[in-house]
């Protein structure tokens, strides 16, 4: 037939489509470029394999047995979309071959999902629109994703989008941004009737990294690359994730917001929020800010009450237990802790003044990666019902603290004697520094009032997209936390 010189013969296997025979793709790739494994030989008799895990679309190319397969090919840390025609006439009988291939390619994931793209064209270095068009859109188009595109136009716009969204229209909200837009989307949904429980159940929230802070993509998709994140979004599992309810007083009224990444007080917060004017420098601005606070032995006194789950070496066994599938109960967006105007519960421990009066870093998080060079919370789990807390003392020797920061890329800092590392269910922090022009509380990288803050875990409240139903690997998964 007319297509024969451009078609490869294929056999459907358990792991993918095995290819033989002459080939040339309609995008000009050679035979060796068309395979995902093999020797790279261009011998037309050589067999190649397109793994189902790399296939993003398949459709019938004629009335008979030829299908057009769209798949990804990894190029360094990114990818390219390829396609080819495959004749699988002898591989199956009485089957819709394209549907069979898609079923194997997507397993339990939604084929051709409806995705609302929310893009922040002002964030990061202002290149989000360019990244979307060149890296993300080609993947979504090849996968036949039903895309609705919206750019944020003003401050708080993403909150409005989350609050007003028609939850029946979308499977996924994909934030082409840093961590700020998903923070706003979640808080907009939290403002809905019933604290957004219905919307959080129906719509998965994910990030396709286009900003300066990409903790959500790094922790769930394992990449800072927008094209790779778009591909992994398509193949990920819908999974319920814990978030954190952050409560502060505003005009004598308690206000609660959702946090999904972290809260910081002390050096981390000041280095992040306090260097906002240097955002053009990229991640190095944060490193410079933290280094300055370490060298000057800055301290941030506070009163701190903590509801501990486990501490120190107990964190390892907790992590391993939950990695084996022991999950928390079904979640709810309802809060259970007392009001800020009430005394902390009796089971909460007040941190000793020799520590709380000399805090250098107070950092609590729910995701393992804060940047591609920082496993700040390597024991974090998506649905263990706890947050990970790190506290350091400004009195610690400077060389020890510098050494600690050289371990963060590997997550080994949590084993240092200078770090209090614990799993906590909640905490209340009352700052004792009073200059809110120089000092900050950071929540998901956003500037929050320098005032008492109470945080509790909201278990399994939000739907996200995870690889294999888990966060990406950290030092705890790789080596049992050694």
Image: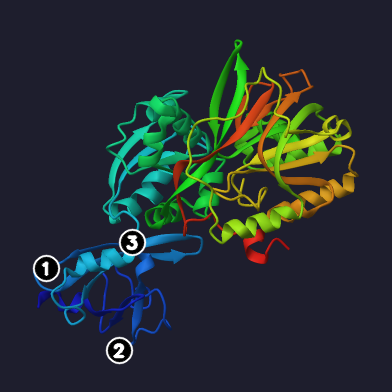
Picture quarter with the N terminus: bottom left
For marks 1 and 2 on the same chain, the one whose residue lies earlier in the sequence: 2
Mark 3 lies on residue: 106
Residue at the location (26% across, 84% down)?
21
Closer to the camera, 341 or 229?
Answer: 341
Residue identifier under label 2: 45
Q: In percent of the image, x 61 and y 59: which residue is there?
A: 321
Where residue 435 appears, as percent x and y from the top left, is 76, 18
Q: Residue furthest top?
A: 251
Instruction: Tell me the quarter of the picture where residue 5 sits.
Output: bottom left
Q: Position of residue 330 (x, y in %)?
A: 47, 44
Q: Nearer the viewer, residue 183 or 238?
A: 238
Q: Dot 3: within a 10 Å radius of its alpha carbon, few (fewer than 14), some, or many (20 or more) residues? A: many
Q: Earlier in the sequence, mark 3 or mark 2?
A: 2
Mark 1 crowd level (few <14, some 14–19, many ≥20, 10 Å Cα): few
Q: Which residue is mark 1?
A: 62
């Amino acid at each position: 037939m007319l297509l024969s010189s451009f078609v490869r013969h294929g056999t459907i296997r358990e792991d993918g489509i095995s290819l033989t025979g002459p080939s040339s793709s309609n995008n000009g790739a050679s035979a060796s470029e068309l395979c995902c494994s093999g020797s790279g030989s261009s011998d037309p008799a050589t067999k190649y394999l397109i793994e189902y895990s790399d296939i993003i679309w398949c459709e019938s190319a004629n009335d008979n047995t030829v299908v057009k397969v769209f798949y990804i090919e990894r190029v360094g840390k990114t990818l390219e979309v390829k396609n080819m025609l495959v004749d699988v006439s002898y591989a199956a009988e009485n089957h819709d071959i394209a549907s069979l291939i898609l079923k194997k390619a997507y397993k339990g994931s939604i084929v051709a999902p409806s995705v609302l793209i929310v893009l922040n064209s002002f964030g990061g270095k202002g290149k989000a629109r360019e990244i979307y068009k060149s890296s993300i859109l080609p993947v979504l188009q090849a996968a036949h994703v039903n895309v609705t595109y919206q750019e944020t136009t003003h401050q708080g716009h993403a909150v409005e989008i989350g609050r007003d969204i028609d939850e029946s229209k979308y499977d996924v909200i994909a934030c082409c941004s840093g961590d700020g837009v998903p923070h706003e989307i979640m808080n907009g949904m939290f403002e809905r009737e019933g604290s957004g429980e219905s919307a959080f159940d129906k719509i998965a929230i994910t990030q396709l990294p286009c900003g300066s802070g990409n903790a959500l993509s790094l922790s769930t998709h394992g990449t800072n690359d927008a094209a790779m994140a778009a591909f992994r979004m398509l193949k990920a599992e819908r999974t319920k994730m814990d978030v954190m309810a952050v409560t502060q007083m505003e005009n004598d009224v308690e206000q609660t917001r959702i946090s999904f990444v972290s809260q910081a007080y002390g050096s981390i917060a000041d280095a992040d929020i306090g260097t906002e004017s240097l955002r053009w420098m990229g991640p190095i601005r944060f490193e410079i800010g933290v280094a300055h606070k370490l060298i000057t032995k800055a301290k941030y006194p506070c009163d701190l009450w903590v509801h501990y789950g486990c501490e120190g070496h107990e964190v390892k066994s907790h992590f391993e237990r939950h990695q084996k599938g022991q999950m928390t109960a079904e979640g709810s967006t309802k809060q259970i802790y007392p009001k800020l105007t009430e005394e902390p519960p009796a089971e909460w421990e007040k941190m000793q003044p020799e520590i709380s009066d000399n805090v250098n870093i107070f950092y609590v998080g729910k995701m393992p990666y804060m940047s591609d060079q920082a496993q700040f919370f390597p024991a974090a789990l998506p649905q263990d019902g706890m947050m990970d807390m790190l506290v350091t003392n400004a009195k610690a020797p400077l060389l020890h603290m510098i050494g600690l920061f050289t371990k963060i890329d590997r997550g080994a800092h949590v084993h240092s004697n200078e770090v209090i590392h614990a799993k906590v269910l909640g905490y209340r922090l009352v700052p004792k520094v009073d200059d809110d022009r120089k000092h900050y509380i950071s929540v998901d990288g956003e500037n929050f009032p320098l005032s008492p803050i109470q945080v509790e875990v909201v278990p399994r409240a939000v739907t996200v997209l995870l690889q294999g139903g888990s966060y990406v690997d950290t030092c705890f998964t790789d080596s049992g936390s050694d």
